[in-house]
Amino acid sequence: MVLGGSLDRGGAPTTPLVTVQVDQAVRRGPDANANNRGPRFSTEKRSTRRWFAACARVRDFPDGASATAGSVARRRFPSLAGGVWRRVSRREFTRYAERDLWPMRRRAVAMLGSMALRATVEELRDLLVKRLAVIDAETFERAASVAVRLRLPLEQALVERGRIPLRFLLAQVAESWGVPYVDLKPSDVDPAALRAVPEEYARRHGIIAFGRRGNRLQVAMVDPRDRTRADDLRGAAPIVERWLADENAVQRALLLYRNDVRQIMERTATGEAHGLEVADAGPATIELLDCVLAVAAVTRASDVHIEPFEHEVIVRYRIDGVLADRLLLAPVALIPLVARIKVLSGMRIDDRRSPQDGRFTADLGGLALDFRVSSLPTHWGEKIVLRVLTREAGFLDLDDLGLRAADHETLKTTLARPFGLVLVTGPTGSGKSTSLYAMLSHLRAERQAIVNISTIEDPVEFPMPRVNQVSVNPAFGVDFAAGLRALLRQDPDIIMVGEIRDQETAGIAVRSALVGRLVLSTLHTNDAVSAVARLFDMGVEAFLLASTLTLVIGQRLVRRTCEACRESVDVDARILAVLRGRPDFDSTVAGLRAEGVLGGGSDPFADVRLFRGRGCEQCAGTGHRGRVGIYESFTVDDEARALMMERRPAAEIRRAAMARGMRTMLQDGFAKALLGETTVEEIYRVTG
């Protein structure tokens, strides 16, 4: 079996990457001797069992990623020699892995997806080390070694270990190849251009036609150096422009070939919810769920709400922090749809009266997404909420969070210390977990393999290499407090606690930081300074908190103004009047004037121009596209420690911190609004 490589017109692989020898003629009775036929796999609803065995030879595979297919096959199927050689395409291998070798399915598909960047080790070394000099040779070789050892794509290892932004890496690779780079989003795809390329051809070769300019067809490709694809598309347009795009972005855009998804997206701009007639048959339910998940992938939704009512079932998506109706279903579709989700999530389908939690992974045409599931009985049936856990968040570093330069340096300095308590505060959905994972990614890159990093989470959202992650399981007595106590006996250097919820967890976390460990965690408070009062309320002693707390970051997520339809506008007098009524308005203006963001006249907003989005196809008529964080960073210095020892109110501690130069979330939001990144209305919406 030949894995990878492109197929020429005769069907033979032009660049074979991995050859796997397979013998699968082994359908025998359960009482047969299986000692020489490899491992045994049993499946439900079958009276017979299959034994599959394989051994792999690896040759001519770039970037060391062959360890995935080769070592997995040798480790899982060590007992069979010989077999039948045959050549298959990458797509056929994927079907083979999904259908037959299901124990190695996740690793095989992950290895296929890891070939996102068709650049060799030598090309990347020459570009990043010699030409751009963004990393040194030692760092590059260490990242390449990590990619082989952990079976990661080389570009991912460079992003995580070399701390190179992924978009910057792709843009520089595209420039070195002499092609443009596009940060492709499904909303960028022109339906007319999409129809110019047949779906089967686009999926097979990993391409997407996303735009037309006169007689030019713009095509995003995983491998834009493949001129054969451009030659094949000459019939669609006289000139084909090849653009480099990330493979995950291409896979998301390919979902637009689904008629149901495309119709939903087309109705989005008009503000209509798309109605679907769904019977209670099994195949129809499977297709319905695939459609619901595909829309979540295309819109980059963070949550999917399936809400039953008397005469309809509404499917809503949280996009950029705001819920929007997208699907209307008949009530008859609820029970089979919920049952399908429960089966995938490992939940009990016969229990409709108790809340349940579960998790599953969906493979949407090569795009793998994890979903955390919660069911809740309501008056008209079970409500389902799916939290979308995209693995792309693992690429975030501190540079990607959007902190201002001074706060960014403060955070890096704090994380360089071997001990202390660092907290991230904010409401649910404000990006606290993403910030914690960015900190862990930074710590892994900075301290390499010399520290033991352990986490206790509810649940584990993003698996990270070389990080010991523990999931909370109350049914077996593993809560945050019990898990944290167990972690302390594992000789950790860095501990991440998903959330401090109770007095016991707070006490253990503070004492862990006191004895020389770096502890990262989150709290649900309205601002950074309020974390002090919350920990006091939980029973933490003032002298312990003053000795261990080093930094608190408060944050919110606001919708980013769409760059495609952004326009300059005057300051809205109504919003400005509301903001003037805030007690911290004067201090906010004073802080922005001190930073040079606002002028020094009597009316600070006299000559200020702001920005907003008119609404276009790319932003679905909302005027917003994506989100950006606004932050405040409370550094615990000697003066703050003195106030904490005296248990002063949070308002007094906050005034003292602002007097020493702390920028509040309101100030940070105003600064980003003046730069055109967001709007004043958004700042008021999230800060109140």
Image: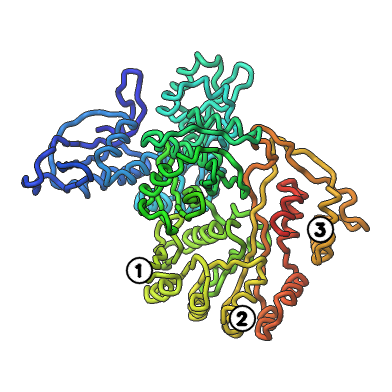
Mark 2 — residue? 546
Q: Residue furthest right?
A: 602
The residue identified by callout 3 is 579
Mark 1: secondary structure: helix
Callout 1: few (<14), some (14-19), or many (20+) C-alpha neighbours within 10 Å? few
Identify the residue under disc 1: 476
Q: Which of 28 and 3 is in front in this view?
A: 28
- Residue 593 x/y as whole percent: 83, 60
Residue 384 visible in the displayed image: no
Label 2 to label 1: alpha-carbon separation: 35 Å
Left or right placement of residue 591 versus residue 300 in this view: right
Q: In which quarter of the image is residue 287?
A: top left
Q: Do the residues bearing badges 3 and 2 touch, measured as CB atoms within 8 Å?
A: no
Which residue is depicted at the point 80% across and 40% down?
568
Q: What residue type is labelled 1?
A: Phe
Give whichever of discs 2 and 1 has the lower sequence position: 1
Q: Are marks 2 and 1 in contact (CB under 8 Å)?
A: no
- Amino acid type at circle 3 is Leu
Q: Is mark 3 on a helix, strand or loop?
A: helix
